[in-house]
Amino acid sequence: MPDTLLAPDLAGYKLYDPSDPFEDYVGPIYYRRQDDGVRCVMPTDERHTNGGGVLHGGVLLTFADYALCSAASYAASGGSMPGSFAMTLSLTVQFLAGGQIGPAIESMGEATQVTGRLAFVRGSVTQRGRRLATYSGVCRHVARDKAMNRRADSGLAVVPGGTRPPGPPADVPVPDGYAPVLRPSPFTTVLGPTFYRQNGEQVHVLQPTFPYMQNSGASFHGGMLMTFADNALCTSITANTGKAPYTATFSAEFLSGSSALGAPLESTVDLARATRSLGFTTGLVSQAGKKLLSYSAAVALKDWDGPKR
C-alpha cells in the first residue's frame, strides 16, 4: 500500500459514468485503473475550505469513501473497472494533518480481503506526498446493472459523468425554533443550509435535502451523510462548550439507504465527554424516523472567538 502518490496527469483519468450527482457536485473526482489497483484523485479549490482555512473534514471523508469503494469494486471484479457497485457498510477515518487548498488529494486503497459479498479495504489520503488521513472500511458489492436499474426506477436522470447538478435554492426558510448552524464554512455552505436547535445540553441538527445529495444508485451519498454528521457533532460541541472542534477520528456505520428527497436529514448528538482539549461524541443520522447512519468521533477543542459580526 503506497504512502505517497505522485501528482497525476489527469489526461489518464476517468469519471464514473453515468454521473454520480454528489461526487460531480463537490468534485469532480477521478479514477485510473492500474495493474496494481485504482488510483483516485480529487482537485481542490476554495469551495472545499473549512472554518480554519484548510480542507474540510467532509471533503476527506467523501474522498476516502470514493477511494474505498473504488478499491472494493476493482478487487471484487478481478481488476476490471468500473467493476461492481460498492456500497459502504462501515468506514473509519483518522485525520493526521490539515490539507492545503489548491493541490489535489490522492489515494489508492488496498483490498485486504474479498468474500462473495464483502470487501475489506484500507488506505491513505495524501497531498503532495504528505499523508492527511488514513482510512479502513467494509463494502458490500453488488452487480452494477442491478444498482443502475434501481437508479432508473427512482427517476434519477442519466447524464454524462462530470455534469454538475444545480445547488440548493437561495430562499430556504429557517424552520420554526431553529437557527443557522454555528461556524459555517465554504464547504458546508456549498452543501446547503443547515439548522440547529438547543434544549439544555441536547442539540438537534437538521438539513433540507436536494437531488445533488444522491449517489449514482439514487440513495444519499455516504460522503453527504458523513459530512452532515460531522457538521452536526461540531455544532453540538460548539453550542455546549463555546470551543471550535477539529475532528481527529470519525467512524460511521451505514444502517440503511434512502432515496427520499424532501424530508430533512436529522441528528441529535450525544456529547459523551468534553475536557479542556478533547471531545467525544456519538450520534445517529435519520430521515423521517428511518435510521440511516450511526457515528462516533473524537475531536480536538480549540478556543473560539464566537460568530463573526
Image (cartoon, grey):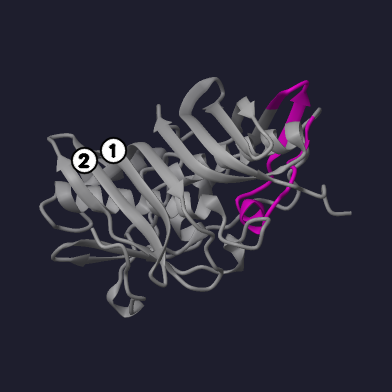
Q: Is residue 53 left or right of residue 76?
A: right
Contact flag, marks 1 and 2 (Cβ < 8 Å): yes
Q: Earlier in the sequence, mark 1 or mark 2?
A: 2
Which residue is denoted by mark 1 in the rendering?
A: 138
Residue 219, position as x, y percentages in the image: 42, 39
Decide: few, some or many residues near mark 2? Use Cα within 10 Å; few <14, some 14-19, many ≥20. Answer: many
Q: Which residue extends farthest front? A: 276
Verify whether residue 172 appears in magenta: no
Q: Is residue 241 left or right of residue 26?
A: right
At x 22% / y 45%, what residue is drawn? 145
Q: Can the viewer see residue 269? A: no
Tell me the quadrant of the picture where the C terminus can be found: bottom right
Q: Magenta residues, as a range?
A: 178-203
Q: Is residue 271 above or below residue 124?
A: above
* Label placed on residue 76: none
Residue 18 location, x and y as percent? 34, 57
Residue for point 73% across, 44% down: 172
Q: Quarter of the image for the N terminus: give it.
A: bottom left
- Per the image, the residue denoted by label 2 is 119
Q: Nearer the viewer, residue 192 or 34?
A: 34
Which amino acid is tagged 1? Val
Q: What is the secondary structure assignment of the residue under circle 1?
A: strand
Instruction: Estimate the x, y position of residue 245 in percent, counting from the top left.
Output: 65, 44
Residue at the spot 46% in from the left edge and 30% down from the top edge: 293
Q: Considering depth in this image, is 281 or 77 the residue closer to the camera?
A: 281
Q: Is residue 178 visible?
A: yes
User: Is residue 47 toward the left or the right of residue 182 in the image?
Assistant: left
